[in-house]
Amino acid sequence: MYEPTHESEIILQTTWIQKAVIRCLQHHIRFSAVDVERHFIHPSHKKHVRETPIIRVYRYLKTTDQLALTAIVSDTRHLMFAKFPYDPTIIRFEQLYRQRLTYMTAGCLFVIKKARLRFANPGEVAKDFDFSVSPNIQVVFMEIEDFAVFSRDQAILPHEAIAKVNMIYYDREYYDLCGPNCYVPEYSKEVESLVSDDYGDVVSV
């Protein structure tokens, strides 16, 4: 594991999460539906994500009751919640790479091939992502169906780089769409601490 010393060393990633999520929400926001967009990232549907969807795994969170693995992922500017379903996502990855999904992959880069954008209710956010959120805020997460390893380098980002990366849920445009009003809560130091801590002993099933 190495620590980049300059921003140019993380140039493999782009800033795409916020633009893609906002673009998708503007066209498909339906608060009564679980799925915001079934083809958020899909080989035959590229209207939402127009850049190469590369993510860095900031932190694995926990295994859910359905054996999915939850995580916080990021591009160069925003973090968001993600979920890796056990079947077929984790099974396919572990058969292809012959290793556990969580083995030496925190901090690595993945390229997403297929993913849904979904809503999570406050109970699901608390239970599956260990995160408390106001019931007035609609939280979306990326359910990753297929992906590949883009870079195995486990980069530890310098503090100045981490300081520029914020949860998308505190973004003004996101909050205008998914919050009850225009008030944006102050960025939580608890979140900053969460994504900066050691990754811990998380293992996939």
Image: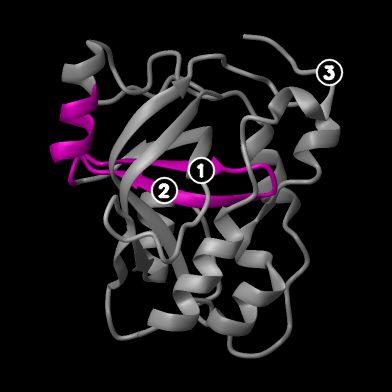
Of mark 1 and mark 3, the one earlier in the sequence is 3
Distance of label 1 from label 3 (alpha carbons): 23 Å
Q: Nearer the viewer, residue 108 or 199?
A: 108
Residue 149 falls in image quadrant: top left
Q: Residue at x 52, y 42 (%)?
A: 73
Task: Say what secondary structure mark 3 lies in.
Answer: loop
Residue 156, given in percent of the width and then of the height, sits at 68, 21
Query: What range of the chain is rendered magenta?
Result: 66-93
Q: Is residue 21 above or below residue 94?
A: below
* Mark 1 closeness class: few <14, some 14–19, many ≥20 residues within 10 Å: many
Instruction: Tell me if label 2 and label 1 are in contact, CB under 8 Å.
Output: yes
Camera-side mark, 1 or 3: 3
Task: Say what secondary structure mark 1 lies in.
Answer: strand
Camera-side mark, 3 or 2: 3
On the question of residue 158 being in view, the answer is no
Residue where numbered disc 2 is placed: 82
Amino acid of disc 2: Ala
Amino acid of disc 1: Ile
Residue 111, given in percent of the width and then of the height, sits at 43, 35
Is 126 one of the magenta-colored residues? no
Disc number for residue 139: none
Q: Give the quadrant of the C terminus.
A: top left
Disc number for residue 5: 3
On the question of residue 56 being in view, the answer is yes
Disc number for residue 72: 1
